[in-house]
Image: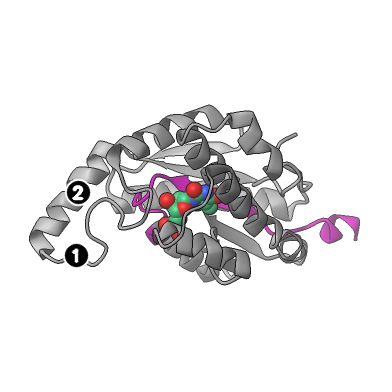
Amino acid sequence: NNHKSDSRGALIVLEGLDRSGKTLQSRKMISYLEGLSYSVESWRFPNRNTGVGQMISTYLANKSELDDHAIHLLFSANRWEKRSLMENKLRSGTTLIVDRYSFSGVAFSSAKGLNIEWCKAPEMGLLAPDLVLYLDIPPEVICSIIKFVVEVKKAAERGGYGGERYGQLEFQRKVALSYQILHDASWKTIDACLPIEYVEKQLQEAVLDCVTTCQKGKPLSQLWS
Ligand code: TMP
């Protein structure tokens, strides 16, 4: 019937500062939904497997220099090259748990000083998430946890607050401020300082609610309209 054909998967995005626990929690959400027999895939941006993704990866590893505007547009292009696949997956009933999306794009670039409206423009027309889960944790807390871990492990592989380009505390503070401007009705902020199991439980509730709404035929919409 009509109702069934409108049924679709949910587009769920995890956002937060570097090392806020997105990757761990996204893995947990995937196994939770799989356990409930939902069709679900784990995605992440940047997707480093495409040509554009490789340019981004080289830049993040400090092995190339790019104008701030140019790298912003590459991050955006990297989402555009996956847009139609994303839509097909959602319409065929697969829920996508996406580690970072346009909000990272805008938050990180505007933290560098680029105009926020300019940053949003190339994202317009990408699919709007049904739910954005923001893992909220002060950069100072992440920083001291990492220092502690490095102390204990001596030679932590990625070392410091992010081995990559954006790893400075001062910069992460600016990113946190930019994220605050982007909040809208689709956002749910989770206090990521709480114990992992507690964060996990809160995410499960939000995700299940969202997946159910999309199954019932909530229409897909686009950023930023
Ligand atoms: P990752 O560590 O999650 O792979 O992300 C790499 C870095 O890229 C991270 O510091 C956030 C940043 N980033 C942007 O600046 N713009 C974007 O559009 C995305 C998706 C990530």
Q: Is residue 218 left or right of residue 203?
A: right
Location of residue 114 with respect to 205 vertically, above or below: above
The image quadrant that residue 164 belongs to is: bottom left
Location of residue 161 with respect to 29 vertically, above or below: above
Residue 145: mark: 2
Kind of residue sitting beneath label 1: Ala
**Label 1 residue SS:** loop
Q: Position of residue 86 (x, y in %)?
A: 70, 61
Does residue 204 appear in this view? no
Q: Position of residue 202 (x, y in %)?
A: 43, 46
Front-most of 11 and 39?
A: 11
Magenta stretch, residue numbers: 1-24
Q: Where is residue 85 in the image (x, y as percent from the top left)?
A: 73, 66
| 188 magenta-colored | no
Q: Where is residue 172 in the image (x, y as percent from the top left)?
A: 36, 39
Quadrant containing the N terminus is bottom right
Residue 169: mark: none
For disc 1, the neighbor class at 10 Å (few under 14, some 14 to 19, many from 20) is few
Q: In this view, does 182 lie to the left or right of 145?
A: right
Residue 156: mark: 1
The image quadrant that residue 184 belongs to is: top right
Kind of residue sitting beneath label 2: Ile
Q: Is residue 11 left or right of residue 105?
A: right
Q: Which residue is drawn at 67% across and 55% down?
A: 77
Front-most of 139 and 191?
A: 139
Q: Residue at x 37, y 52 (%)?
A: 165
Colouring style: one colour
